[in-house]
Amino acid sequence: MKIGIVCYPTFGGSGVVATELGKALANKGHEVHFITYNQPVRLDFLSHKLHFHQVVIEEYPLFEYQPYELALSSKMVEVVRKYELEVLHVHYAIPHAYAAFMAKQMLKEKGLDVRVVTTLHGTDITLVGSHPTYKTAVEFSINNSDVVTAVSNNLKETTNKLFNITKNIQVVYNFIDTEKYDNAHQEECKRSALAKPNERILTHISNFRPVKRVEDVIRIFAEVKKEIPAKLLMIGEGPEKIKAKKLAKELKIADDVFFLGNSTEVAKILCYTDVFLLPSQTESFGLAALEAMAAGTAVISTNTGGLPEVNIQGKTGYLSDLGDVEDMAKNAISILKDDAILEKFKQNAKEHTKQFSLESILPVYEDIYKSCYKVK
Ligand code: GMT
């Protein structure tokens, strides 16, 4: 098939899922066209099956805010016409689902019928989408997509609670290429560069937005350190990074906390991680936790949103109430203090990710694209 993928090209989970999906579809012989404002960070190669079309915004002094949706929908129309795309799969409702609806209408006028699949990822519903500023347009564009998917049961339920949805939302879990994480293990894992043999390694990966509660990450680690020699790796960039660094200094643990910035090599970093920390305010799914689990890492997280669908209490890690730093630290210590217990959690975590494998999720999306032509 010929598929257009619209996403945010950044390090956020929705962009990562969209890019990995596009690459896998191209690998299977589909023709995939990414349409976004920059080449997605995980789109590390292009081919005759894998294209990138940049949405360029013309700056004009009259505009305080540049009309990105207009540029995006015009680009979608151009690419659909030129390459005869059959489906536009948009990731993250704002503004992609709305721009896709506009593109679909413009194409209809030209006698072309492109189908729109919208995948809801989380904050497009929970934090941003349901805000009165956007709600009407988000609800409209969800209801006017041909197919709507959500990345967890929890996100589906939340969407139905917050909006008046007239469509059945299909749940399609996020996925990972499990092989990629196995290979990272086979390569030399440079653990010794970061920690002494007797030290445990804890890791947090995110875009350091308030919703990720990175200060809780630092506080949990400070508690763990009181009992267990350890290092903390903080991967990512974002507005809360300064606060997290400051807190690490205040708690006198700064020498054991490494802020490593953004990385496209998370599998390599995760290969020497013992425990992954994700104390988010909400998380529709928690792709970062799934990636960590695929690399054989136990997860300490909150029990918010879709996290209980990914991290299994007492098996792959532990889940605590939002903000309960003490409980999260206690749980981390209970896993880290004993080699055998840690190994068991790591194995369980890795095993659990098999149900989220690329091989099982990819055909689901292919079926959705085919089914688009049956729904009207
Ligand atoms: O978590 C973020 O801030 C990024 C955001 C995104 O859309 O890029 O992530 C959301 O989508 C991911 C992929 O489906 C999910 O794994 C994340 O849980 C979700 N984030 C939140 O719900 C906060």
Image: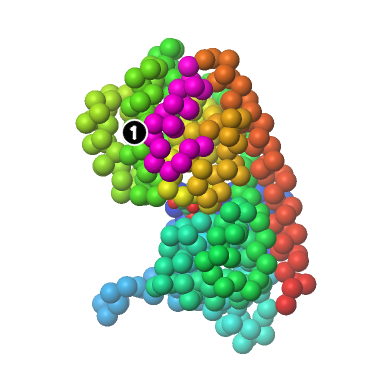
- The percent coordinates of residue 30 (x first, y second) are 70, 57
Q: Identify the amino acid type marked 1.
A: Ile
Say if residue 6 shows up in the picture: no
Residue at x 32%, y 24% (from the top left corner): 256
Residue 326 falls inside the magenta stretch? yes
- Is 351 placed left or right of 193 in the picture? right
Q: For label 1, count other residues whose C-alpha is less than 10 Å away and answer few (under 14), some (14-19) or many (20+).
A: many
Residue at x 39%, y 41% (from the top left corner): 323
Q: Is residue 149 above or below residue 208?
A: below
Quarter of the picture containing the C terminus is bottom right
Which stretch is magenta? 319-337
- The percent coordinates of residue 76 (x first, y second) are 55, 72
Q: Is residue 23 above or below residue 112?
A: above
Residue at x 51%, y 56% (from the top left corner): 122
Q: Which residue is mark 1?
A: 218
Magenta highlight: main SS: helix
